[in-house]
Every structure is written in C-alpha cells, then in structure tokens.
Amino acid sequence: MGYLTPILIRNDALNTIQEHSEKFVEGIINKMYEGGELPLGNHCNPVEVFQTQHMDIPRVFIVNSNTMFEVNSNLKNKEFAKDFYLQSIKIAKQIIKDCERELK
C-alpha cells in the first residue's frame, strides 16, 4: 500500500473502454511501472498512465489541451513542445494564485 498511479482518461473513448474493460484494467497494470499511453480498440491513446510513485513523493500534474503532464525535469519532447509547456505552466501558476487567494 501507499503507491499511487495517476491516469488520464480521454472521455471520447469511454465506449471503447467499456467494450474492452478487461484489456483496460490489464493495460493499466502493465503500464503503471513505466508509464505510457494505452491503446484500446480503434483509439490509439484513450488512456495515459503515469508511473507509479510512493504517496510520500509530492507530484504536480497539469491537464491542458487534451493531454496531461507531470511538472518535472523529464518533460517529453521538451524542445518541440516548449511553448506549450511554458503556456501550461503559466496557466497553472494563475490557478494556484487564485486558489491561494480563495483560501486566505
């Protein structure tokens, strides 16, 4: 116990996930230690599974523009998607700022 696996589900594939529910569960189990996209049926990436980590390790994720990424130094396609990452981080900072203001 004590390990968490973040998962992004793209809702347009819910019917496919339901049709292939056993492969969905098996796929999550198979992907949870290395992370990655999980193809199902005719969808190439309806689910993205992020690597399992212990619950004591703080993690930050940003969900934006049909994707989710963990904010860390291991960003995928860093040079290609640099502007996207920077814009997403800017949006996240504003959300955090608004949340802090709401909590005070």
Image (spheres, rainbow, N blue to C red):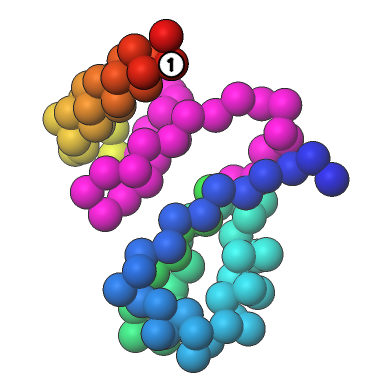
Tell me the amino acid under the disc marked 1. Leu
Name the dominant secondary structure of the magenta segment: loop
Image position, residue 8 (x, y; %)? 44, 56
The quarter in which the N terminus is drawn is: top right
Q: Residue at x 62, y 49 (%)?
A: 5
Q: Residue furthest top?
A: 104
Span shown in magenta: 51-76
- Residue 74 forms part of the magenta stretch: yes
Q: Quadrant of residue 104?
A: top left
Image position, residue 67 (x, y; %)? 31, 50
Q: Is residue 68 above or below residue 101?
A: below
Q: Residue furthest right?
A: 1
Q: Residue furthest bottom?
A: 19
Q: Residue at x 63, y 73 (%)?
A: 25
**Residue 51 placement, left or right of 79:** right
Q: Is residue 44 visible?
A: no
Q: Residue at x 60, y 65 (%)?
A: 28
- In the image shown, does 98 or 22 lie closer to the viewer? 98
Q: Residue at x 60, y 60 (%)?
A: 31
Q: Label 1 belongs to which residue?
A: 103
Image position, residue 77 (x, y; %)? 29, 39
